[in-house]
């Protein structure tokens, strides 16, 4: 189903806010509530434009950042903490689920 320019703009604005607050301790729900439409409308428009929920998209963005940090040699525990995971095991589980690879796959080559 096609989307309007207004919907595309709203989805883009939400996306930019998600990126800006990627590692901040703020929920995706709170981010969506900042926009001048209802939470439900923001969620529907985002899913319509990007074909994924804002929460899932945010997790994908976090894992892309994690890949870059791991590749630069940052310790897994530090990466997990930077991305808001209190337990590195939860981070590793999420990383594997999203990337289909263990974090060690992205360790710098020696």
Image (tube, rainbow, N blue to C red):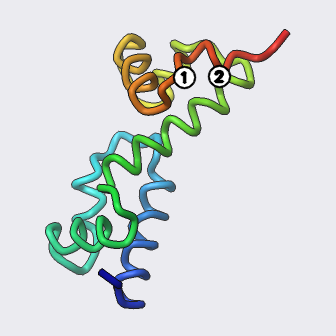
Q: Nearer the viewer, residue 26 or 8?
A: 8
Relative side of 104 to 46, left or right: right
Instruction: Classify mark 2: residues with Cα within 10 Å, few (<14), some (14-19) or many (20+).
Output: some
Q: Nearer the viewer, residue 56 or 23?
A: 56
* Residue shown at 34% from the left, 17% from the top: 90
Q: Residue furthest right?
A: 110
Is residue 84 positioned above or below 28 on the image?
above
Could you tell me if the residues under marks 2 and 1 are in contact, i.e. CB atoms within 8 Å? yes
Relative image position of residue 60 (x, y in whole percent):
45, 43
Tell me the number on the disc at residue 70. 2
Give the mark nearest the N terminus, 2 or 1.
Answer: 2
Is residue 48 positioned above or below 93 on the image?
below
Q: Quadrant of the C terminus?
A: top right
* Residue shown at 43% from the left, 82% from the top: 9
Relative image position of residue 77 (x, y in whole percent):
51, 13
Dot in front, 2 or 1: 2
Is residue 26 positioned above or below 104 on the image?
below
Q: Residue furthest bottom?
A: 5
Relative side of 103 to 31, left or right: right
Instruction: Classify mark 1: residues with Cα within 10 Å, few (<14), some (14-19) or many (20+).
Output: many
Q: Which residue lies under the disc numbered 1?
A: 79
* Residue shown at 57% from the left, 30% from the top: 66
Residue 106 found in image quarter = top right
State the SS at label 1.
helix
Q: CA distance from mark 2 to mark 1?
A: 7 Å
């Amino acid at each position: 189903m096609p989307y309007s320019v207004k919907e595309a703009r709203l989805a883009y604005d939400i996306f930019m806010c998600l990126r800006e607050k990627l590692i901040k301790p703020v929920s995706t729900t709170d981010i969506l509530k900042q926009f001048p439409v209802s939470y439900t409308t923001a969620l529907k428009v985002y899913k319509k434009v990007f074909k994924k929920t804002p929460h899932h998209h945010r997790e994908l963005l976090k894992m892309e950042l994690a890949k870059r940090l791991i590749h630069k040699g940052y310790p897994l525990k530090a990466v997990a903490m930077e991305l808001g995971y209190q337990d590195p095991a939860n981070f590793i589980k999420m990383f594997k689920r999203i990337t289909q690879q263990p974090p060690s796959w992205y360790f710098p080559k020696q």
